[in-house]
Amino acid sequence: MPQFTDLTGLLGVASVMSAIVMMLPGIARLSTLHKGILLSLIFVSVLMPLGELPLAAYVRGATGDLSITTLVLIWGSLLHRWCGFASIDAKQRDVLLKVVALVAVALYPLSLGVSMFDPYRYGFACVAVIIALLIITLTAWIRKSDLIALCIAFVALAWSIGWYESNNLWDYLTDPFLAIYALWVIAFSMKKYFFKRPLKET
Amino acid sequence: MSYWQQQPKHRKLLLLLVAISFAAAFYKAMHHPAPATFVAPVNDQLVGTPKAIIRSHFVSPTQNISTHAASLVDLGNGYIRAFWFAGSREGAKDVQILTSVFDPVYDRWSPEIAIVDRHSTQSDLLRFVKKIGNPVAHRASDNTLWLYYVTVSIGGWAGSSITAMTSHDDGNTWSAARRLITSPFINISTLVKGTPFNYSDGSIGLPIYHEFIGKFGELLRLSPGGEVLDKQRLTSGKLAIQPVPLIQDTQSALMLMRHTGSAPKRVIGAVTTDAGQHWSAPQKIELKNPDAAVAGVALSDGRLLAVLNDTETKREVLSLVVSSDNGANWETVYQLEDQHGQHPEPAGYAQRAAQLAKDTEATIVDASAYGASARHSKCMGQSCEFEFSYPYLIQAKNSDFHLVYTWNRSHIKHVRFSLEWLDQRITELRKEETDAAVH
């Protein structure tokens, strides 16, 4: 009998695989009903055992469980493409990715032993970290950056109820794939910014 | 304008979600267990072996397979259960974790039984598993038997994660395996080797180490249910791995670690005097170490006992060493193995290994099979070497010591000695020192 945290982990991987299929050319032309049927088929096929394991379990072996932030972005995209739900505001998404990139730049090198300081330790129920996240969330809500507020609220809730195997808040907030995506988006926008700037006249 | 900004009611709902989520988060954080003290070593010394004895056996009888990384757990009344991994080669897909029980009445090990392989593990974990290894056993305060082992889905051992399973009948049956999440980087590169220990509140201390890019030791604290409560870094950079805690009392411990840094090659040590809340900066101690695993225990009288390859290069010497001054000075009590400088060609190697097998267990019928098995694992072309590695030492509640280690990557060897033997051996050494000083 699969554990609850295995099901949530596999559903996360299945969500990403579904989002990838929904981005394929021609899918946008399908009706909402047909897209719904397609999504159901994708979920069933990646979660159904192929030999020893379902396809999602092979992917999960390599990726681990995806962060709640990743899932919010994935489901935002999925719902938009499937049933026309309002798309994620690009500006808010970019701010969120900047926050993720900032966390990643500190978290991953330090977790690989750069120094004796290990920020990952403070993800195991550190009150100061939770207070900091609450301040960020409320600030985001006041400034109407609702995507950030929504993401962090889901992160806090998922961690509290033990949505995944991990007992560490950082694993719910970010994952290496989201961090790579965030850094890539930031690098791309910086390149665009500098490329478009007019040269100063001398 | 985003969807949320156009829907003021939904913004209020969002605020409600924030309130609920953070209330739950604060509740969880407030109920996080407080730091606890160590459970100090206590030995009943009632039913232990009353004589000064030292005996050795082979735990694993199977020939011509790669066998490695044994650990032990006390079952009580002198019975001991061992775990190790074996397969066609280290890291092969056919590797299994095997177990056997030592019967003190008949002075022998039971036939080995496979309890885990990569198929059963990936079926339990619902994720692909390429290989398994390094089983480490532990008895928790509530009497549950825990077995921790590493699993790899991608890459080599540096890509390991820790998997745990439990038994409530001393290892006859096991729960489904569960994954421990210990690293933010796809949960890779956390391995086990050192001896776990108990905290006074029932939580478990599990020494772990990291091998991807950096090489460093860490300490996990797990709840009695197996939830990761805390992770503490013991070293950083590429200095040391495989920490082994020697718990001296409720507050003090010495952590010995395998040195992976630059010469001079020495065991790395760190101490705590506040039950592990703070550890001293890691530093080299006097014991030599050729980048090889160390084992050790603290005795209830404060002495420290360790087993290691006390050379700077190879694993062909294995020594039992003792310290009576909290690890400042160590002396060799007994040479468990010494094949220093012995590099015979394959035929001579097999012959010598067969003799060593016979010395280990006089009742072995076909010692040459052990010799051939060692040659199978340790000879490459015309080059052969002896290896005695990955020691794991415990003191049973009856005060007897049990040591297991990898014997030429082909068998697991068990050495059992009594506290009386240890004391007698130390007395003999003192006498020899006095005699030498006189002469």
Image (cartoon, grey):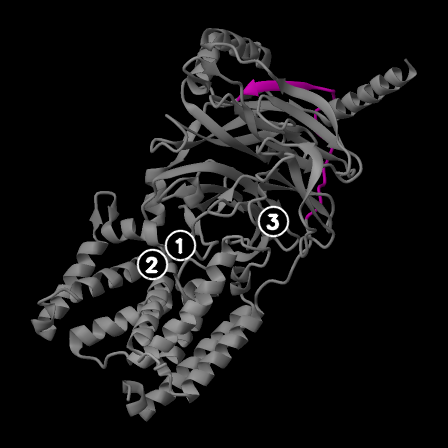
- Chain hosting mark 3: B
Q: Residue at x 37, y 58 (%)?
A: A5
Which element type, helix, strand or loop, lies under badge 2? helix
Vertical arrangement, residue A51 with respect to residue A9, above or below: above
Neighbourhood count class around disc 2 (C-alpha, 10 Å): few under 14, some 14–19, many 20 upward:
many
Q: Residue A190: x and y, percent? A: 35, 72
Query: Can residue A22 be seen at all in this image of the molecule?
Result: yes
Q: Nearer the viewer, residue A202 or B239?
A: A202
Circle 2 residue: A9
Instruction: Give me the C-alpha separation between circle 1 and circle 2.
Output: 13 Å
Instruction: Give the amino acid at mark 2.
Output: Gly
Task: Check residue B218 in the rendering and tell me which mark sits there, or answer none.
Answer: none
Residue B48 shown in magenta: yes
Q: Is residue A102 above or below residue B282?
A: below
Assign a secondary structure to mark 3.
Answer: loop
Q: Quadrant of residue B357?
A: top right
Q: Nearer the viewer, mark 2 or mark 3?
A: 3
Q: Position of residue A13 (x, y in %)?
A: 28, 59
- Residue B335 versus residue B55: which sits nearer the camera? B335
Give the alpha-carbon distance from disc 2 to disc 3, as whole Å: 32 Å
Look at discs 1 and 2 and give the one toward the viewer.
1
Q: Which residue is mark 3?
A: B235
Magenta highlight range? B39-58
Residue under circle 1?
B186
